[in-house]
Image: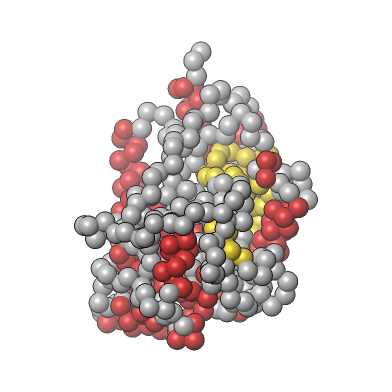
Amino acid sequence: MQITPLNPEDPPSLGDFELLGRIGQGGMGQVFLGESPGGEPAAVKVIKPSVVDSVSRLRFAQEIEVLKTIWGARLAAFLGADAEAEQPWLATEYVDGPDLARHLRTHGPLPSVLTAALGAILAEALSAVHTQGLLHRDLKPANVLLGPNGPKIIDFGLAAFTEASSSLTAPHQVVGTPVCMAPEQAAGVKPLTAAVDVYALGALLLFAATGHYPHEAATPYMVFHLVTDPDTAPDLSGAPDALVPLLTGMLAQNAGDRPSLTEVVQQCRSVIEAQGMKIAQARRRLTAHTAGQRHKAASADASTLSAWPAPVSDAPGTEVTPADLDTPAPFDAPEPSPTVLDAPGPADPTVQDSPGPVPPAPPAQRDPSGGSRREQPAPDRRPPTAPRRPKEATHTLRHSVQARKTAARLRAAYAAKAPF
């Protein structure tokens, strides 16, 4: 996970967490690397002041309640929060690794056995979430972080308590990421069931194995049309033969035809065992693979790096709220933020926060070479123009080893760029 220096206008701390750098940002929020008084590193999410209102506070408070409820080895742990602060914030366990989307864009698809291992790990984690009466509703590659001890699921901002109680979503409103969204979720059907997370996991595994999603098009509305059309089958081109039966079931149009998460785990085990490996071996190989690729990239960067890298246009692994309407392309385009749309109907769909109706989109087209349409990358964010004052040595001594190294690199970066 790339960490960049704090901007001059960034707060030095939120609650008891001192802020050390920027992890990423979305349309409505920012995520910082923070540290507790006891030296525990944390990912601290905050809503941008310009978008703090009653609705964003309610959604933030709901996410906090969800994080207080869930637990599991493959879920980023809740560390603290304050939804009533002037800048609402929450802190979760810091996972030192890239998100799955960024890893795949950099290193390419995973082999079938490692994709199956990833599927078993995430299916088991989601099963624990469902056991606690919750749905994730926005599982996607950007919401899976590849840490040194394996993958972890993050961002429960759209999670719901199986939608049995009142929801912040309007009756005909759709919230989520279209390319990973189940047909019933895209159609605005309520209440939703555990099958929506099964579908999203299937879309994630297809992307991990092939570099593309089940349905891709130029706009989210066109994706919604493809997803909800019962006559349009998901695109499984390029999927390894060993994974096709599993992916076909998980991406079934009818929620009742999809396997349970327990069955997903068993099918993933069968794929792994058919290749002469045990599930524990495949899990270790997955972690070694992702960590090894990361260390190779870090070594290559270290040989040429003269200063701390500037922010990139990649979307962060921890998005905050619905903001972006772009559809992702394989590997080289930013991962989309959740989309807020009215449920598909006879009239043209309208974006909730759009000033007016969206004109009809042109027919979907695919690249003649067989690849999907790629979105344009966002313009590079401008780096901070003024250095922050370095911290006193006596203050730095209380940091953890990891935080001290991070802070030292930040200070060196600023010193290298300072005009005086």
Q: Is residue 16 visible?
A: no
- In the rendering, at what x and y percent does residue 189 appear? 58, 76
Q: To which quarter of the image does residue 240 belong?
A: bottom left
Q: Is residue 263 visible?
A: yes
Q: Nearer the viewer, residue 20 or 111?
A: 111
Residue at 58%, 32% (x, y): give it: 7
Residue at 55%, 47% (x, y): give it: 26
- Picture layout, residue 345 above or below residue 294: below
Q: Nearer the viewer, residue 242 or 404?
A: 242
- Picture layout, residue 379 above or below residue 280: above
- In the rendering, at what x and y percent does residue 186 appear? 52, 69
Q: Nearer the viewer, residue 251 or 392?
A: 251
Q: To which quarter of the image does residue 115 belong?
A: bottom left
Residue at 28%, 67% (x, y): give it: 111
157 left or right, relative to 251: right
- Number of marks in picture: 0
- In the rendering, at what x and y percent does residue 289 appear? 33, 60
150 left or right, relative to 126: left
- In the rendering, at what x and y percent does residue 52 appear? 71, 46
| Coloration mode | secondary structure
Task: Name, please, the residue furthest toward the left.
Answer: 369
Residue at 70%, 68% (x, y): give it: 167
Task: Name, please, the residue furthest toward the top.
Answer: 420
